[in-house]
């Protein structure tokens, strides 16, 4: 079952902050975040592993609540380049990944 | 340049005509995966492979086949395509497994008439 992302879309002004949430009904081993710009392939942002390890982006932070099976991506002081669709992917076991439906983020000048 | 390549990038075909979408990576990655992307549904995993001759089903494997005879290549085969397989397809690879950064190919837009 796909994780649920919220909000589905958000519009920001440059410099504003945003939070994107990802929620799963299953116990998670890992949460993955990717950003996709229009007409391009998804690009890796961050991985959060059960137990607290994080791998990823310097300017974007995220949290992983293992008990609630939730993750949040924090975009602070947003820039125009942050525009795109953000996907969370959840790993339950093995090497299968299930992605959510995406959150469209638009940053305006 | 480290990259994942897919061919063709665009394909229009008819129902029932077998086709293969190729995927190749030059990073010596063990893990390779295929996804399809449809509006509102995000990325859905079709198949993945941990290494040569090791493949497993993802969330939506019906109607697709894959093979991993060489480490660098992971072709996606549609034996009898149907219109509901019209989609944007991405191949991805990573070192070690799914818990590491995945590098995506440029995508293949497939239309089945």
Image (spheres, rainbow, N blue to C red):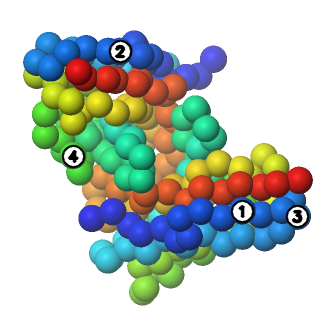
Instruction: Indicate which label's residue lies in the foreground, 4 or 2.
Output: 2
The crowding category of the residue bearing disc 1, from other C-alpha atoms within 10 Å (few below 14, some 14 to 19, many at least 20), is: few
Q: Is residue A86 left or right of residue B23?
A: right
Kindly identify which residue carries mark 1: A11
Q: CA distance from mark 2 to mark 1?
A: 34 Å
The crowding category of the residue bearing disc 2, from other C-alpha atoms within 10 Å (few below 14, some 14 to 19, many at least 20), is: some
Relative to the observer, which residue lies in front, B4 or A104? A104
Mark number, residue A15: 3
Kindly identify which residue carries mark 2: B11
- Name the element at disc 1: strand
Relative to the observer, which residue lies in front, A12 or B79? A12
Relative to the observer, which residue lies in front, A65 or A84? A84
Which chain's residue wears label 4? B
Residue at figure coordinates x 33%, y 47% from the top left:
B44
Q: Does mark 1 fall on the same chain as mark 4? A: no
- Answer yes or no: do the residues labelled 4 and 2 have beta carbons within 8 Å? no
Q: Does mark 4 fall on the same chain as mark 3? A: no
Residue at figure coordinates x 77%, y 55% from the top left:
A107
Mark number, residue B60: 4
Tell which circle, 4 or 2, labels the residue nearer the N-terminal end: 2
- Answer yes or no: do the residues labelled 1 and 3 have beta carbons within 8 Å? no
Residue at figure coordinates x 42%, y 59% from the top left:
A100
């Amino acid at each position: 079952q796909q994780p649920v992302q919220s909000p589905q879309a958000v519009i920001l002004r440059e410099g504003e902050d945003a939070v994107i949430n990802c929620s799963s009904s299953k116990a998670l081993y890992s949460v993955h975040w990717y950003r996709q710009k229009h007409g391009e392939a998804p690009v890796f942002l961050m991985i959060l592993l059960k137990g607290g390890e994080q791998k990823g982006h310097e300017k974007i932070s995220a949290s992983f609540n293992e008990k609630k099976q939730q993750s949040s991506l924090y975009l602070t002081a947003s820039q125009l380049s942050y525009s795109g669709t953000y996907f969370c992917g959840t790993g339950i076991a093995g090497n299968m990944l299930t992605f959510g439906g995406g959150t469209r983020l638009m940053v305006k000048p | 340049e480290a990259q994942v390549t897919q061919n063709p990038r665009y394909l229009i075909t008819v129902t029932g005509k077998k086709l293969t979408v190729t995927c190749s990576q030059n990073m010596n990655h063990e893990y390779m995966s295929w996804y399809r992307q449809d509006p509102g549904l995000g990325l859905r995993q079709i198949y993945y492979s941990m290494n040569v001759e090791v493949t497993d089903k993802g969330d939506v494997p019906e109607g697709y086949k894959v093979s991993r005879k060489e480490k660098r290549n992971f072709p996606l085969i549609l034996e009898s395509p149907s219109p509901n397989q019209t989609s944007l397809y991405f191949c991805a690879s990573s070192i070690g497994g799914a818990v590491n950064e995945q590098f995506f190919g440029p995508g293949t837009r497939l239309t089945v008439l």
